Structure formats: C-alpha cells, structure tokens
C-alpha cells in the first residue's frame, strides 16, 4: 500500500514542482491565442484569465486558488477545470472536498471514467480521509452498472486505510448501512464483530448494534450446525461440571435429624435383637439446566464482548487526547499552540505503548492536521528510522519535501542528513544543492551544513568553495558591506578553517578581508579577537593589540568643505564605530594586555585609552545632555523677539513708526 500511495503522490505532483511550476508552464490558461474580433467578450472567461494571472503572481496564496476554482466552475469548461484542479491539488492534495468537486465536474460532463479516475487519485493522495472514501463509495453505488462487490471493495479498501482511526465512524456507519441495504445480515454481523476490537469513538453504539443483530438472528445465521452443536455440547459440559462441583442440598426437614444423628450413639437407639435401620441415602446432585439457543448465542458472543471490554479501556485512555483535537482535517490556517502540544503528547503516549501499527496510524492522522509543520514530519521520520522502518521513512520524507513542506529549507536539510545516515551521499548532496541553488541561496545555516557534509566526505576543496563563492557574491552586493550576510559568513568560514583543517593563517586572512570591507560592525572585531585567542598563535598578543587599536581609533576627520583642495574622503583610517563601542573595546584592550602581556604592554594600553577617552563617554554624553536641556530652558524663558526689539528701540523708533503709519494713511 505504501508503494501505491507513493506512486499516487508522484502522480499528484506530476508537474514536478507542484502548483507553482504548473502555473508557470500553463501560462494564463488561455491555450492558443484567440482573435478578439472573432467572438464577443465573455465576462466569465475574462474573470478566469484574470484569476489565472493572480495565481501566477502568488502561487502559494490559498485564497487566490479558491477564487480561480470558482471562476473555472462558473465557466464550466471541462478542459479548464481539469487544468485548474490538477494544478491546485498538486500543492494541496489533502483538501478532500476539492477532489469531490473535481469528480463531480467530470461526472457533470458525462465522463464517468474520468470521475472514477479522480476519486482513485484522491483516495491515494489522502487515504486518511474517511469522508472522501464515503463519497467514492456513494458515487460507485450510483452508477447503473455498479455491482455490490464493486462498492464493497471500496469500503474494504477504506477500512484498510482509515478503519482504525478513532474518528472513522462515518465510514463504518455507511458500510454497515450498505450491507443492511443488501439484506445480508451475516455481513452486517461480521462488520460489528470487527468493530468491537477497534477503539473507536462510537464503540458503545456498535456494541448495541451487535447485540441487536445477534438477538434478531437465528442460530443458523450466526454459525453452522456443526459449530452450534459443538458449542452447545461445550456449554452442557461446563454446566454439568459446575453442578457436580457444587455441594449437594439435603431434603427439606432432614437437617435437624442429621444433626441429632451425629450426636447420638447408634447402639443406644437400637433395642437388643433388633436390626439397625438402613443408612439414609445421599441426596442426588441437581441435573444441569438444558442449553437453549439463546444460551448458545451468548456463548458465541462471549469472546467478542471480551474484545469490546479491552477496546473500551483503550477508548478511555485515548479520550482526553481525542477531546482536545478541535481540527482533525487539513487547513491552511495554522493550528493553535494547545492543539499542537496535544498532538505531541498524544504521540508520546502512543509511542510508549510500543504498538507500531497504532503509532503509525496516529502519526498519519496527525500529519493531516499538521501537514504544514516540518517539525512533525521530522519527528515521524526519526521514529520510523529508530524502528528500522526505512521504507515508511522514505515515503514520509518524500511527501514532506515534494508537497507539504516543499518551500521550507529546514525539511530539505533534514532530508540531506537522513540520506547521509542511510549512505545515500549523492542524495544528500542533491538536497544541499537544491537549497543553495533554488530555495535559499544565502542561507548561512545551509552553507555551514553543506560545507560540513563535504568535509565528512573528505572533500576540502568543495567545502571551502561553498563559503568562498558566497563570500565573493556578498562582496559584490553593496548592502552586504554594511548590514548583510558578509561579516557573519566570514566569522563562520574562519572558524570552520581553524577547527576543521587547523588552518589558522587562512582564517585570519578571511577575517582581515571582512574587516577591511565592513569595519563598522563591532561583532566582527570581537569575533576577530576571539578567533586569535582561540588559536593562540605565537604573535597573538601583537596581532590582537593591533586589532584593538584599529577598532578604538578616533573617527576619521573630514576635510572642511571650504578647502578648495578637499575631497569627499576623510583624513586617515579612523574607526567608524560609535564612541561608546570604541571606548568599550579600548577598555578590553587593557584587560587583554593584563592577561596576556607584560607590564609595559598594560601601561601602553592604559596611556592610549587615557589619551583618547580622557572624559568617559558616559560622562561626556551626560554633559552634552545637560547643556542641551539648559539651552532649551533658556530659550523657553526668553521674551518674544518682536517685544524685545520694540523695548530696545525707545521713543525714536516709536516716532518713526508713527510717521510711517501717517504716510501709509
């Protein structure tokens, strides 16, 4: 069955990369270009083309897809419907309702064979959907040429795929109803017998149905004459043995006489010359009751009732987890934290039981509701790998990486590690190439993992090339020189060279080059110092002090703009770090010299710090703040400028003002 499902997923994902690739290759769904003057405009067709274009621009937007499906349904062109549904279901195969809508569309266009084909693809792509199985069986039953065996075979396939799910009662109810419609009581009874051994939500209902069916059945409908005779004989023997083992009851009124006979002396009760009375006979054991047909029925039911009791106990154990599941079907909306946590606890519970079949069933149920969560797929694969179920693990990983979590880099990196553990080196390398080539070319964690993978394969050249090619690319990015990936990539590469290949010199050069390009990042200076401390090279003290001196150097002073010979370049190679960062690194230089250098080295670091930071940054900043606050307060208290001007001008100004006013008048 796993092989069938895998083939089905390959068919569903037959466009190689899912819905996005299909949309890209399908154009706008118009097919051949049409002459606009050949026919009047069709609003439904225009809406369909418009929806196609929207999907092309955002192929992972579920709402846009549903809008496109609605437009195709209103247009009702079977070719366009197929195009849309095939593309949509390649990315969302668990949306069972759309499989049914697709089959309905085929049936509406008189394509019964196409509808059956769609249902077959659907139940293969989402085999845990009891609802889709029921729709398929109902459709098969509605066909004029359908036979009961054909419908029954669908229900049996459904029972194999989803029959042990806690919430599979909808499918079982329909199966029972179908057999009742056929008037085949033995088949109905056989279904009830199967159900009593499965922990289902409606187990109690099936028990009552089982009892009612047995009660309404003749003994010959339950078993053959030979089996009934054998069971009757067995019950008769059991009753006879029980009767023989039970103490015999004396006749009424004899209890007192027997007690007296025990105490009396028999010789004293018999006169001389007389014969002794005969001893009383022991009472006979009661004959066992006759075994009736109802007794045989109860005997036949007994093992099934024992199975029911066992299933009932399991239902009670699972019920707290099941009650916490609010959404057991797939939806693009995220699950809340409570439901995600409940699934994890439920899986813990099932794994602890040690029943692989039940655990696989629960994982498959979980990965319908949690299909978009790579973490749950990874947990499933790890558990399967632990159980040595590698075929199941490969199948689960294939579904996760090709359909449900395809855009996520973490699931592909997980797959690469899995393939490597399984000895599939090329498969692992292909995963890394896909992530770095198509999915996330600048993902640092992917570069690191891929380089470590190549190191484990003994391929230093390939490992270093991964870092160096991305470093070269970052150097060409303007934004990468100040706030991009470049500094952190250099840190990682330098550490990799030192730890993996003991190449301290090359690692130093990598960091030196990064500092030349991005000197304004404090973390990069700190990383360079830490790198030297970890390597403990002979020239560590001298090199680290040079790093600290460059990092804490005064900022470059620009040439005044009034200088005709000036340029836009600052004077000197000053540090672009903030005053606070430069002062902190200068203090660290003193601590480093104290730990690794001589007294003269400490003195030199202290003198340099005192020259540059005579007034500590915090004190200077506070002073500047107070000065600014005082200036603001003074400005607020000063009188308005116009009023001051009139007061200072005196009588002459007032006279001049009057003359001006007279002139205007």
Image (cartoon, rainbow, N blue to C red):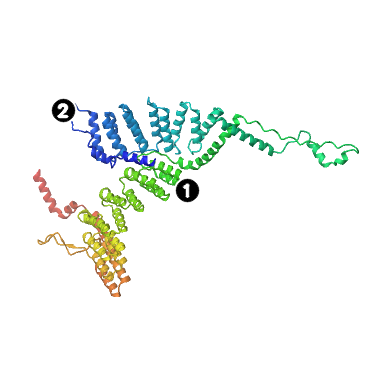
Question: Judging from the image, what secondary structure is the residue with disc 2 in?
Answer: helix
Q: Nearer the viewer, residue 363 or 13?
A: 13
Which residue is disc 2 drawn over? 37
User: In the rendered image of this protein, does residue 190 appear above or below residue 539?
Assistant: above
Q: Nearer the viewer, residue 225 or 6?
A: 225
User: In the rendered image of this protein, does residue 318 appear above or below residue 47?
Assistant: below
Q: Quadrant of residue 273?
A: top right
Q: Quadrant of residue 356?
A: top left
User: In the rendered image of this protein, does residue 474 appear above or below residue 87?
Assistant: below
Q: Which mark is residue 22?
A: none
Find the residue positioned furthest to the front. 226
Residue 629 shows up from this direction: no
Residue 280 shows up from this direction: yes
Identify the image quadrant of the C terminus.
Answer: top left
Q: Percent from the top left, x then y, of residue 634?
A: 24, 57
First-in-chain label (1 vs 2): 2
Question: Judging from the image, what secondary structure is the residue with disc 1 in?
Answer: helix
Q: Percent from the top left, x then y, of residue 138?
A: 40, 29
Count of marks, rendered view: 2
**Which dot, 1 or 2, sits closer to the camera?**
1
Which residue is disc 1 drawn over? 352
Q: Residues within 10 Å of mark 2 (few under 14, many from 20)?
A: few
User: In the rendered image of this protein, does residue 267 appear above or below residue 38?
Assistant: below
Q: Percent from the top left, x then y, of residue 139?
A: 38, 29
Identify the image quadrant of the N terminus.
Answer: top left
């Amino acid at each position: 069955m796993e092989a069938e499902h895998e083939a089905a997923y390959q068919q569903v994902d037959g466009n190689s990369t899912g819905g996005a690739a299909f949309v890209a290759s399908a154009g706008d769904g118009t097919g051949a270009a049409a002459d606009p003057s050949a026919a009047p405009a069709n609003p439904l067709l225009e809406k369909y083309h418009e929806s196609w274009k929207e999907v092309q621009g955002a192929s992972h937007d579920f709402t846009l897809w549903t809008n496109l499906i609605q437009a195709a349904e209103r247009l009702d062109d079977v070719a366009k419907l197929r195009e849309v549904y095939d593309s949509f279901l390649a990315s969302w195969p668990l949306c069972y309702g759309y499989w049914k809508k697709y089959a309905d569309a085929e049936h509406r266009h008189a394509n019964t064979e196409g509808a059956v084909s769609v249902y077959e693809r659907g139940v293969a792509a989402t085999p845990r959907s009891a609802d889709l199985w029921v729709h398929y069986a109902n459709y098969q039953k509605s066909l004029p040429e359908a036979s009961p065996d054909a419908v029954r075979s669908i229900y049996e396939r459904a029972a194999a795929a989803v029959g042990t799910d806690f919430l599979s009662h909808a499918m079982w109810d329909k199966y029972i109803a179908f057999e009742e419609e056929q008037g085949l009581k033995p088949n109905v009874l056989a279904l009830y017998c199967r159900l009593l051994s499965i922990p289902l939500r409606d187990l109690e209902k099936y028990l009552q149905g089982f009892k009612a069916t047995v009660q309404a059945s003749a003994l010959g409908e339950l078993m053959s004459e030979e089996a009934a005779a054998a069971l009757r004989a067995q019950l008769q023997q059991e009753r006879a043995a029980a009767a023989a083992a039970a103490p015999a009851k004396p006749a009424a009124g004899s209890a007192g006489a027997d007690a007296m006979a025990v105490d009396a002396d028999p010789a004293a009760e018999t006169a001389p010359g007389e014969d002794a009375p005969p001893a009383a006979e022991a009472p006979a054991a009661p004959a066992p009751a006759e075994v009736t047909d109802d007794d045989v029925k109860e005997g036949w039911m007994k093992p099934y009732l024992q199975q029911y009791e066992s299933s009932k106990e399991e239902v009670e154990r699972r019920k707290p987890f099941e009650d916490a599941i609010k959404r057991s079907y797939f939806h693009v909306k995220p699950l809340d934290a409570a439901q995600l946590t409940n699934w994890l606890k439920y899986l813990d519970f099932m794994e602890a039981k040690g029943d692989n079949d039940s655990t696989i069933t629960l994982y498959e149920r979980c990965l319908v509701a949690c299909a978009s969560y790579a973490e749950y797929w990874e947990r499933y694969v790890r558990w399967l790998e632990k159980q040595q179920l590698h075929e199941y693990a490969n199948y689960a990983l294939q579904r996760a990486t090709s359909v449900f979590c395809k855009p996520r880099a973490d699931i592909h990196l997980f797959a690469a590690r899995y393939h490597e553990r399984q000895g599939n080196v090329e498969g692992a390398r292909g995963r890394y190439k896909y992530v770095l080539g198509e999915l996330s070319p600048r993902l640092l964690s992917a570069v690191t993992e891929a380089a470590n993978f190549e190191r484990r394969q003994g391929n230093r050249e390939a490992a270093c090339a991964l870092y160096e090619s991305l470093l070269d690319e970052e150097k060409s990015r303007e934004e990468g020189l100040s706030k991009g990936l470049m500094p952190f990539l250099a840190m990682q590469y330098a550490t990799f060279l030192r730890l993996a290949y003991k190449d301290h010199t090359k690692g130093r050069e990598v960091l030196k080059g990064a500092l030349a390009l991005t000197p304004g990042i404090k973390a990069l200076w700190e990383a360079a110092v830490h790198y030297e401390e970890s390597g403990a090279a002979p020239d560590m003290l001298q090199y680290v002090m040079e790093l600290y001196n460059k990092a804490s150097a005064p900022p470059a002073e620009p040439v005044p703009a009034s200088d005709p010979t000036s340029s836009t370049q600052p004077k000197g190679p000053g540090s672009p770090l903030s005053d606070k960062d430069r002062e902190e690194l200068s203090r660290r230089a003193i601590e480093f010299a104290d730990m690794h250098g001589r007294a003269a080295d400490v003195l030199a670091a202290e003198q340099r710090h005192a020259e540059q930071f005579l007034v500590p940054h915090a004190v200077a900043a506070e002073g500047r703040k107070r000065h600014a606050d005082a200036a603001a307060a003074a400005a607020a208290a000063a009188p308005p400028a116009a009023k001051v001007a009139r007061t200072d001008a005196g009588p002459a100004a007032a006279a001049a003002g009057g003359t001006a006013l007279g002139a205007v008048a």
